[in-house]
Image (cartoon, helix red, strand yellow):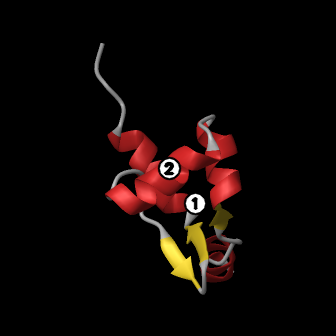
């Protein structure tokens, strides 16, 4: 059963560029700049659309954390 739950979590829908922008509270254009300049979370091209795994978005955000 645990394997099934992990598989379902791994297969949740990919984040759209709009969802990434909303989640990070940045303009949509910023997400597209990340894509073209190589910054931001790992993005996947699905046809002509940009998508990201939520785990990659969260990992990238964690890497941006600065110590106080």
Q: In front: 25, or 4? A: 25
Q: Residue at x 69, y 54 (%)?
A: 18
The image shows residue 2 at horizontal and vertical percentages of 63, 75
Classify 49 as above or below 33: below
Q: Residue at x 63, y 47 (%)?
A: 28
Residue located farthest toward the top when viewing the structure as drawn:
68
Q: Quadrant of the C terminus?
A: top left
Q: Is residue 56 left or right of residue 64?
A: right
The image shows residue 61 at horizontal and vertical percentages of 44, 42
Mark yes or no: residue 37 visible.
yes
Q: Is residue 66 left or right of residue 20?
A: left
Q: Which residue is mark 2?
A: 58
Q: Quadrant of the N terminus?
A: bottom right
- Residue 23's disc is none
Number of other residues with Cα within 10 Å of mark 2, as a class: few under 14, some 14 to 19, many 20 or more: some
Q: Which residue is mark 1?
A: 54
Q: Secondary structure at mark 1?
A: helix
The image shows residue 35 at horizontal and vertical percentages of 43, 61
The image shows residue 67 at horizontal and vertical percentages of 28, 20
Classify 24 as above or below 39: above
Classify 50 as above or below 55: below
Q: In front: 16, or 27? A: 27
Q: Are marks 1 and 2 in contact (CB under 8 Å)?
A: yes
Q: Is residue 44 left or right of residue 8?
A: left
Mark yes or no: residue 41 visible.
no
Q: In front: 68, or 52? A: 52
Question: In whole angstroms, how far apart are the C-alphas of marks 1 and 2?
Answer: 6 Å
Q: Residue at x 63, y 59 (%)?
A: 17
Q: Secondary structure at mark 2?
A: helix
Number of other residues with Cα within 10 Å of mark 1, as a class: few under 14, some 14 to 19, many 20 or more: some
Q: How many marks?
A: 2
């Amino acid at each position: 059963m645990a394997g099934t739950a992990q598989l379902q979590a791994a297969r949740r829908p990919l984040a759209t560029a709009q969802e990434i922008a909303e989640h990070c509270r940045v303009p949509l254009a910023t997400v597209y700049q990340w894509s073209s300049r190589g910054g931001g979370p790992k993005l996947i091209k699905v046809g002509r659309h940009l998508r990201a795994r939520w785990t990659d978005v969260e990992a990238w955000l964690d890497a941006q954390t600065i110590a106080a």
